[in-house]
Amino acid sequence: MDSLITAAARALAVGDPLLALKRVALRDDAPALALRGIAMAQRGDLVRAKDLLRRAAQAFGHKDSVARARCVVAEAEIALVSRDLAWPTKALDAARLVLERRGDHLNAAHAGCLIARRLLLIGRLEEADRLIYEIDPSPLSPALRAAYELAAAGIAIRRLQTKTARAALDRAVHAAQLAGISALKAEVESVSLLMTQPAARVIAHGSERFLMLEEVEALLASDALVIDACRNTMRTAGTTVSLATRPVLFALARALAEGWPGDVTRDTLVKRAFRAKHADESHRARLRVEIGRLRSELGALAEVNATEQGFALSPTRTSEVVVLAPNAEERHATVLAVLADGEAWSSSALAIALGISPRSVQRALEQLSSAGGKVQSFGRGRARRWMTPPVPGFPTTLLLPGPLPSG
């Protein structure tokens, strides 16, 4: 490798893309194209960066499979940063295998981190956790080690494992300081700030307050009957009942929990569960049916007893009932929660991350845009991206729907 290529690579390693471009800006050989692509990515010109990396991969040819695989990994990182979740992940899997077989363990580990971070974005925590566990972080450079620890912290945050998350963030801070890259330090700091923000609200005895992530973890580990409106589940003493596919039953359970220890009138339950303005006999008949179904779903967790005015919830394993709710419960709150990371998302990427249809996402974005500019877009056609600056009171990604911690 010639001296200019070596100097450019060293400049990129310390986060100085301008110095790297000075060394290779006028060269079109494969190594120079790859380094120029990485430099443009560091400067934020992701479209140009992807083009340069693809040209570099073609220029390396089939004889240099390791260099081609490294270009694929670099392009995958750009896709992740630009939230292009539709980018072909099979290419990254293949590149990772090539790097592992050819002894490039550092870039193979980096590829694994990218796969894990993508899995985390789309909510596949079990797969992300398994992959992170398999990766040996010891060969990683400080910059890549910081990215690895950020992925580990993200998994722990979503699983409400706050001690594990804080330990991973501490290691990420240390690695970022060693790397000396300002952008990386800022990314680690922004994730660390999530731990200092309210993660959810608790509603009990007619009042509500915000909870930090540690408090949410403690609440779910307690003996209280928790009606979790973040995941549409009910949980106590290690037993969880999911009503994620039964929205009417969950609406009834939540209304009864918010009214506990008193009862809730039939008219109120009808309005909460069926969204009816006025309760008639047909609504009351349906309410009796749904209450029967709720009793069946609750099982040993609680009883639903009829009163003169309506129904009351009576827990059987605890003396406390609380509702755990997101910070904000406005329409399309989950879309806002994903956009709250400050990155620019395409509607297709949002659909993949949230597991809903692209058309539903597009309608939500249009409504949020027209409702006081809660989201903003730039670009046109397939290049259109959506984002919103972090605003106090918006939901965070800490408690987006996902699996509960094991009991």
Image: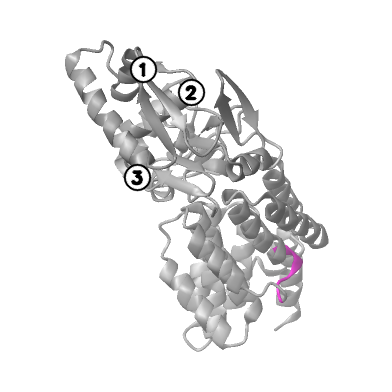
| x and y percentages locating residue 132 in the rendered image | 59, 67
Q: Residues within 10 Å of mark 2 (few under 14, many from 20)?
A: many
Tell me the quarter of the image containing the N terminus.
bottom right
Disc 1/disc 3 C-alpha distance (Å): 40 Å
Q: Residue at x 52, y 36 (%)?
A: 226
| Element class at badge 2 | helix
Q: Earlier in the sequence, mark 2 or mark 1?
A: 2
Q: Which residue is mark 3?
A: 356
> What residue type is disc 2 on?
Glu
Q: Residue at x 34, y 45 (%)?
A: 356
Q: Residue at x 34, y 13 (%)?
A: 308
Q: Which residue is mark 1?
A: 307
Q: Residues within 10 Å of mark 3 (few under 14, many from 20)?
A: few
Can residue 369 be seen here? The reply is no
Q: Quadrant of residue 318?
A: top right
Question: How many labels sit on residues?
Answer: 3
Q: Which residues are magenta?
A: 139-143
Q: Residue at x 61, y 48 (%)?
A: 160
Q: Main secondary structure of the magenta part?
A: loop
Q: Which residue is mark 2?
A: 258
